[in-house]
């Protein structure tokens, strides 16, 4: 409220104060005895002198208080949403484990084992699917399937003649690996390769002469007057190369990959010295048989492959490999030849021919007329007891499928003999390992689900029954019911096999021991799994697992334990299930709480604006009144002074 108008017996100093953004000053007032005259007006402080901001905040608090309550409710709703999302994740994991048990591999999985003949090794391994029949049979393998191979003629590149070896510099010879200048070491002696060094020669700048000076004899390996390799011999074991070598001449001479003989005193080139680079264009290749055309086609197994002057030996190999010829081409640099290998076994011979007037296939010696040798691919030959009367069977592949339902034979060796004594015995049995793994995954997921339910809905009490702690979803009837239904389904479902009744305990799965939960001990709903019990049960009753799971087909699962559990999970996880309904309700509740918060915020904002406007108006009015009072006070002071002067003169 405004300060009262008061009279003063003495002059008061000018004062100033601040309220909001307004300022005002009260001038000094002179007081004179006026008898019964009205006292002068004075307003203290800035306009009202009130802390209007604080007043507005307190008045608006009537709206912010309920907003905070709703915000607290919204926080709880968000926590519940997170809890149900966690539960959903655990439900989905449990349902996945259940559905795995319903599949054929877990319910009726088969496993094959092999027993080799006495004193021998197994000629095959096998894989089995659930369709395989339990039982035994024997297999004899006479021969394995092989791939066809075409080995082109060796030394397709132009040779190094004897004359060239003695007169031409190393860098000009048609080596398969281009030599580099520098030095290389033999038995500790550095041998120099410069631009004038030749291969052979008893004296001068030759490798032969330099090696001789180092106590090493180098002789040429020749064929038809051409130098195809070299041989080094010494009185002591040869030591080739040193860390400081700068020339690759030992590699060029095909010595670094050669195996020593004679106790290490002799080493001979293990490949052709001449060769062709994969990156050289076909017309530029220095072939023993020159090309008659830079463009043309070759035919591999009936597939036509074109080449041009821009192709290299490497790109030609790529074209062959990417074609439908059914072969893999490669270049063997040690023998300087092309090799074609069939991509599939048992496919017969490989054929290569030129067409269109070119001679590339002949120049690369890939035709039989040019020296290529062909080893046709052959089928595997084997016999299986009970199949084809035990007579031999041929297969283009060493992997034999569809001969025996549900069984794949992987032939990998030849039997000692095609007699019963040389046969490998195959046994198809129940795959208890797959069922054990699937059941363990189920137990783990089930326990996680039950523990999660307990985490969010459990209530702990003291010995007097007073609640000590309650989960976020404590009291939710659906969640409590789910825990009970899961427990009841697992523990109460039984099956009958050959007139005998079995429970899940027969498979080694049972409810865990009593645990101390809070202050009051209660039995846990978690499961325990004894794999030894399962193994023994399946050995005694092989179909026991199927009785609980079905044999992997939908028609076999009606009324089985895991079909019932899957239906229970479906009632929660399906689009219109309990889980979706609950989450939808929480989403709607969260949206409603957000709207309530917005409404309270809007009302608080509106009220703040109204109160601010009202106080601003009040301040303006009081400021005006203060100004008028100051003016009146000044007027009264002037009148009093005039009256006093008149009285004195009289």
Image (cartoon, grey):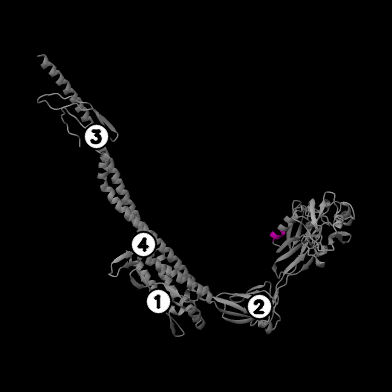
| x and y percentages locating residue 411 in the rendered image | 66, 74
Query: Disc number at residue 582?
Result: 4
Residue nearer the viewer, 333 or 187: 187
Q: Residue furthest bottom?
A: 499
Query: Disc number at residue 491?
Result: 1
> Distance of mark 3 from mark 2, alpha carbons?
106 Å
Disc 4 vs disc 3: which is toward the camera? 3
Range covered by the magenta-colored residues: 319-323
Query: Is 101 on the left-hand or right-hand side of 219?
Result: left
Q: Is residue 131 visible?
A: no
The residue labelled by disc 3 is: 619
| x and y percentages locating residue 8 in the rendered image | 16, 28
- Is the residue under label 1 in contact with that under label 2 (CB below 8 Å)? no
Query: Disc number at residue 122?
Result: 2
Q: Quadrant of residue 161?
A: bottom right
Whether residue 203 appears in magenta in the rendering, the answer is: no
* Earlier-in-chain disc, 1 versus 4: 1
Query: Is 222 on the left-hand or right-hand side of 514?
Result: right
Residue nearer the viewer, 58 or 433: 58
> Distance of mark 4 from mark 3, alpha carbons?
55 Å
């Amino acid at each position: 409220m405004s300060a009262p108008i008061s009279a003063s017996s003495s002059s008061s100093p000018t004062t100033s104060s601040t309220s909001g953004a307004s300022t005002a000053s009260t001038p000094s007032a002179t007081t004179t005895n006026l008898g019964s005259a009205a006292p002068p007006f004075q307003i203290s402080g800035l306009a009202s002198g009130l802390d209007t901001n604080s007043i507005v905040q307190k008045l608006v608090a009537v709206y912010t208080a309920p907003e905070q309550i709703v915000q607290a409710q919204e926080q709880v709703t968000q926590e519940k949403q997170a809890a149900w999302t966690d539960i959903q994740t655990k439900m989905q994991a449990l349902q996945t484990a259940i559905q795995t048990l319903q599949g054929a591999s877990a319910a009726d999985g088969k496993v094959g084992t092999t027993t080799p003949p006495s004193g021998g090794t197994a000629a095959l391994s096998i894989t089995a699917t659930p369709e395989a029949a339990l039982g035994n049979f024997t297999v004899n393998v006479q021969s394995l399937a092989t791939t066809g191979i075409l080995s082109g003629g060796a030394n397709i590149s132009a040779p190094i003649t004897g004359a060239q070896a003695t007169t031409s510099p190393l860098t000009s010879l048609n080596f398969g690996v281009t030599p580099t200048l520098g030095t290389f070491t033999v038995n500790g002696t550095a041998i120099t390769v410069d631009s004038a060094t030749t291969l052979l020669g008893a004296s001068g700048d030759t490798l032969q002469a330099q090696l001789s000076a180092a106590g090493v004899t180098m002789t040429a390996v020749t064929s038809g007057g051409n130098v195809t390799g070299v041989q080094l011999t010494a009185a002591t074991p040869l030591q080739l190369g040193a860390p400081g070598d700068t020339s690759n001449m030992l590699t060029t001479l095909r010595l670094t990959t050669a195996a020593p003989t004679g106790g290490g005193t002799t080493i001979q080139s293990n490949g052709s010295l001449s060769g062709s680079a994969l990156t050289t264009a076909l017309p530029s290749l220095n072939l023993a048989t020159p090309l008659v055309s830079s463009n043309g086609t070759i035919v591999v197994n009936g597939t036509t492959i074109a080449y041009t002057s821009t192709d290299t030996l490497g790109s030609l190999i790529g074209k062959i490999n990417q074609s439908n010829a059914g072969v893999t081409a490669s270049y063997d640099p040690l023998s300087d030849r092309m090799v074609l290998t069939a991509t599939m076994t048992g496919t017969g011979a490989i054929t290569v021919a030129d067409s269109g007037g070119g001679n590339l296939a002949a120049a690369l010696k890939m035709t039989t007329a040019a020296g290529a040798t062909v080893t046709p691919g052959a089928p595997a030959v084997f016999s299986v007891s009970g199949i084809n009367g035990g007579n031999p069977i041929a297969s283009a592949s060493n992997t034999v499928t569809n001969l025996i339902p549900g069984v794949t034979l992987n032939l990998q060796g030849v039997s000692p003999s095609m007699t019963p004594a040389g046969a490998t015995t195959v046994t198809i049995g129940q795959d208890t390992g797959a069922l054990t793994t699937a059941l363990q995954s189920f137990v783990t997921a089930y326990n996680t689900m039950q523990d999660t339910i307990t985490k969010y809905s459990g209530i702990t009490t003291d010995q007097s029954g007073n609640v000590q702690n309650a989960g976020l979803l404590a009291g939710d009837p659906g969640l409590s019911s789910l825990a009970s239904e899961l427990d009841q389904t697992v523990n109460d479902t039984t099956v009958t096999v050959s007139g005998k009744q079995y429970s899940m305990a027969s498979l080694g799965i049972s409810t865990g021991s009593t645990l101390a939960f809070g202050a009051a001990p209660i039995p846990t709903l978690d499961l325990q799994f004894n794999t030894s019990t399962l193994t023994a049960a399946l050995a005694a009753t092989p179909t026991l697992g199927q009785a609980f799971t079905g044999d992997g087909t939908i028609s076999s699962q009606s009324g089985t334990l895991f079909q019932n559990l899957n239906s229970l999970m479906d009632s929660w996880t399906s689009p219109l299930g309990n889980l979706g309904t609950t989450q939808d309700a929480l989403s709607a509740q969260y949206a409603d709480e957000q709207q309530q918060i917005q409404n309270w915020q809007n009302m608080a904002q509106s009220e703040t604006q109204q109160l601010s406007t009202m106080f601003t108006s009040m301040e303006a009015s009081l400021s005006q009144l203060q100004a008028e009072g100051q003016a009146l006070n000044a007027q009264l002071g002037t009148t009093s002074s005039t009256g006093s002067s008149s009285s004195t003169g009289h």
